[in-house]
Image (cartoon, rainbow, N blue to C red):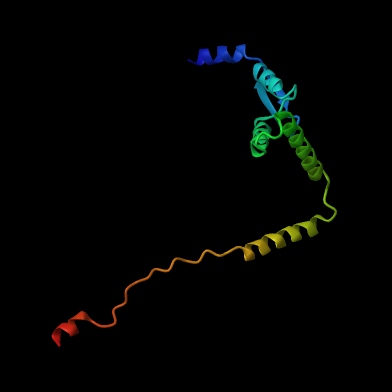
Amino acid sequence: MELAKQAILKGTNLAFAKCECCGLTEECTDEYIKRVRDRYSGRWICGLCSEAVKEEVQRTDDVIGKEEALIQHMNFCKKFNTLLSIPPKNPTQELISAVKQLLLRSLDSPRSSPVRKTCLVRSESCFSALNS
């Protein structure tokens, strides 16, 4: 069994592919890389970005094609990565502001009230009614 696994691994050519959207690097077989590139006009994108592109096409009810959805997703990733690479001007102030927003959101969110159990309370003993 172990020899069969080793023979399969020796026969596969693994390569690293970098996602053209988010920059994630994955180790894949050459065949898989080729299939993904064929599917996305010569671009290699990771599984997460592929799902995002599929969801964008479905969300727009196929009004836009896969190529347009891919371009939109690539632009989104580029903007997002640009925002992450810019260091904040005042990190302490931004952290305080973020914590403040979290606290305000938690104060504004509806509280789940504890479940009150209704219990029957006896006002009198039933035996006294029988005795009279």
Q: Tell me: residue 104, above or below residue 82.
A: below
Is residue 131 toward the left or the right of residue 94 in the image?
A: left
Q: Position of residue 70 (x, y in %)?
A: 73, 32
Is residue 95 toward the left or the right of residue 111 in the image?
A: right
Give the residue at x 67% y 36%. Answer: 52
Rendering quarter of residue 79 = top right
Rendering quarter of residue 39 = top right
Residue at the farthest left position:
131
The image quadrant where one finds the C terminus is bottom left
Is residue 8 toward the left or the right of residue 67 in the image?
A: left
Q: Tell me: residue 106, above or below residue 49.
A: below
Q: Between residue 70 and residue 23, name the one nearer to us.
A: 70
Q: Between residue 29 and residue 80, name the one nearer to us.
A: 80
Residue at the farthest bottom position:
132
Q: Position of residue 129 (x, y in %)?
A: 18, 84
Q: Tell me: residue 8, above or below residue 58.
A: above
Residue at the farthest right position:
89
Q: Position of residue 83 (x, y in %)?
A: 80, 45
Q: Between residue 91 and residue 120, name the one nearer to us.
A: 120
Give the residue at x 61% y 13%. Answer: 10
Count of numbered badges drawn on the protein = 0
Give the residue at x 42% y 69%. Answer: 116
Give the residue at x 63% y 65%. Answer: 108
Rendering quarter of residue 36 = top right
